[in-house]
Amino acid sequence: MPAAAANLQLRDGVREDAVPLTQVVHLASEGLALAMWTDIAGPEGDPWQIGRDRALRDEGAFSWRNARVCERNGVFAGALIGYHVGPTPEPIDQDTPAVFEPLIDLENQVPGSFYVNVLATLDGHREHGVARCLIEDAVQRADGSDLSLVVASGNTAARAVYAALNFIEVAAAPANDGFGWTPDFTEWILMRRNA
């Protein structure tokens, strides 16, 4: 790890990370996750609890088991949730909400890659190398596979970080409304880094 990042430490996610992981997913999804959790929770429920319950699952894409955490000076600073995509594209289920179809379509374009499903740095920890540290760790976890991720077209700061880490933009899909969520950007951008 570079000297400038000596105060950063990586570790596997644990169940106790459910609260900050929920915040990371909210940030990485540009608010879409919270909109979905709010829809599931209904008017009397707690959407953040829905997110925490999902983070606490032992299985599924959004599970503490798929998380790598970066701590800065001993404090949770950010996380990456990733996994290997299967060798063949997954069909989009007819019950899939339209808001998720472009994201699934983009993921289906990178079979066999290590897919960065979620990556975000919490407020107060940005511009300290957290995302870079997590991506460099993901390269090792990818075990020789390409890395892929999806980012909002309007998130120019993240796109610049990924470009600096040798990701290239390979495809785009429209950002659809859903669950009362209206994106303030036009497209989801698929980026890939060759092994």
Image: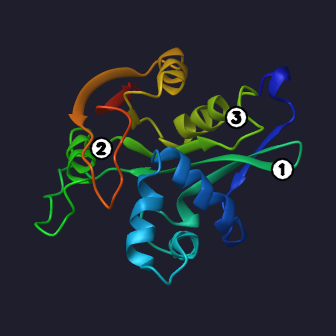
Q: Quadrant of residue 39?
A: bottom left
- Residue identifier under label 2: 112
Q: Residues within 10 Å of mark 3 (few under 14, many from 20)?
A: many
Label placed on residue 75 = 1
Q: Which residue is mark 3?
A: 130
Q: Quadrant of residue 179?
A: bottom left
Q: Who comes first in sequence, dot 1 or dot 3?
A: 1
The single residue placed furthest to the front in the displayed view is 43
Q: Is residue 114 above or below residue 57?
A: above
Nearer to us in this view, 120 or 112: 120
Q: Nearer the viewer, residue 68 or 146?
A: 68
Circles 2 and 3: CB atoms closer than 8 Å: no
The image shows residue 76 at horizontal and vertical percentages of 77, 51
Quadrant of the snapshot with the N terminus: top right
Relative placement, left or right, of 147 versus 79 is: left
Disc 1 to disc 3, how far (Cα)?
12 Å
Report the amino acid beneath label 2: Gly
